[in-house]
Amino acid sequence: MITNNELFIQAAKKNYELFKVPTNMVKAKKTTRFYTAEQKADLDIKTSVNKIGDIINLSQELQTHMWHQLNHGAKYKDIEEVYFDICQLAVLSNLAIDAAKKEFDITIADELRKLKEKWIRRDDTGRVIKPFFFGFLAKEKGYYNPEKKNYMHHDTSMDYLHKIINGYLLPKNMECNLTIDEILDTSDYDYENVRRDNVNKIIGMLSDFSQYSYTLWNSPGDKGEKYKEFNETRKWLYKEINLLTVNIDTLIALYRKLKKDSLLKKWIITIIFNIGNDQAFKLIKQSEQPIANLIQDENGDIEIYGTKYSKTYKKAPF
């Protein structure tokens, strides 16, 4: 990065003598190969298990640990060992990338395993400590396990960034109409308090109901009878959803999931505000400005059809 930003420059100078640039000094092994199917297959097998993702994840985990310590008063000598291992991971990532065109005497998987075992951290209950932001991908990919892993918030940039972005929704304004994003107040959203299992259950119910609805309205039959069946099924859907635990944070997570789904987003208002759960109404933002009201007033300065009014202001009744 090339920059003249004073903050970046000062930060770079602050630890310039301490944090060096990791340099790959591992020599590649000379291997004579021939352009044959057997040789190509052998090289393909040797490079088929690429650990670059695991290396980067461990590096980020150790950097999180290191900067958390520095932000809590640790000195360079306190984090020197973990910093050197982070540098080693930087070299390992370089080797993993070059493995497609070079061969080395070291086994990347073995080196990675040693570092993982060396720096494993556990909380008082025995759970493995992971950076807070790791939990996001774990939930999205389906291997989130809070019983075995503690996705702990650290004082480090990625956890700060995750918390800020997670609480922010980009406002939109189309022809001066308010979108639901601008109506809901998600500033106190607690990612850890979401019942992810119930979000997935509701999404599944809606998917089934949407398919049922499409089939019902596109099949032959009396429209009146169809409408009656549709309403009965919809009431059953609301009843089933109401059996689940849907707190405010779960509601926000559900909303965010629904609005990304082109087929299901039409159900956002219906589900959020009609399932018999008053949590959604607690999310409605209070007006930032007092709301103007007209009251009839003989001395008022506003005249409508011969009747005078004056303008008063009051806060929204939420």
Image (cartoon, grey):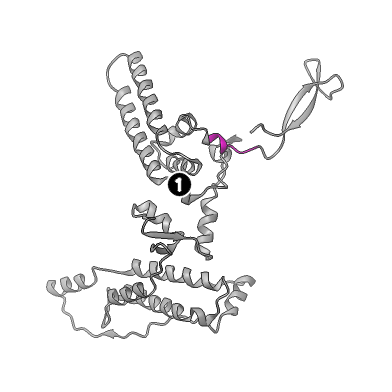
The residue furthest front is: 124
Up-down relation of residue 178 to residue 145 (above or below) = above
Residue 150 in percent (x, y) is at 42, 60
According to the picture, the residue beneath numbered tag 1 turns out to be 194
Image quarter of the C terminus:
top right
Give the left or right position of residue 95, taking residue 260 as reference.
left
Assign a secondary structure to mark 1. loop
Residue 312 in sight from this viewpoint: yes
What residue is at 39 percent from the left and 52 percent from the top? 139
What residue is at 55 percent from the left and 44 percent from the top? 186
Residue 175 in sight from this viewpoint: no
Residue 103 in percent (x, y) is at 25, 80
The front one of 94 and 231 is 231
The front one of 174 and 253 is 253
Q: Tell me which segment is drawn in magenta.
A: 280-286
Q: Amino acid at mark 1?
A: Val
**The image quarter in which residue 29 lies:** bottom left
**The image quarter in which residue 7 lies:** bottom right
Up-down relation of residue 217 to residue 176 (above or below) = above
What residue is at 31 percent from the left and 13 percent from the top? 222
Residue 140 in percent (x, y) is at 38, 51
Mark 1 Cα shell of 10 Å, populated few (<14), some (14-19), many (≥20): many
Confirm whether the magenta stretch covers residue 281.
yes
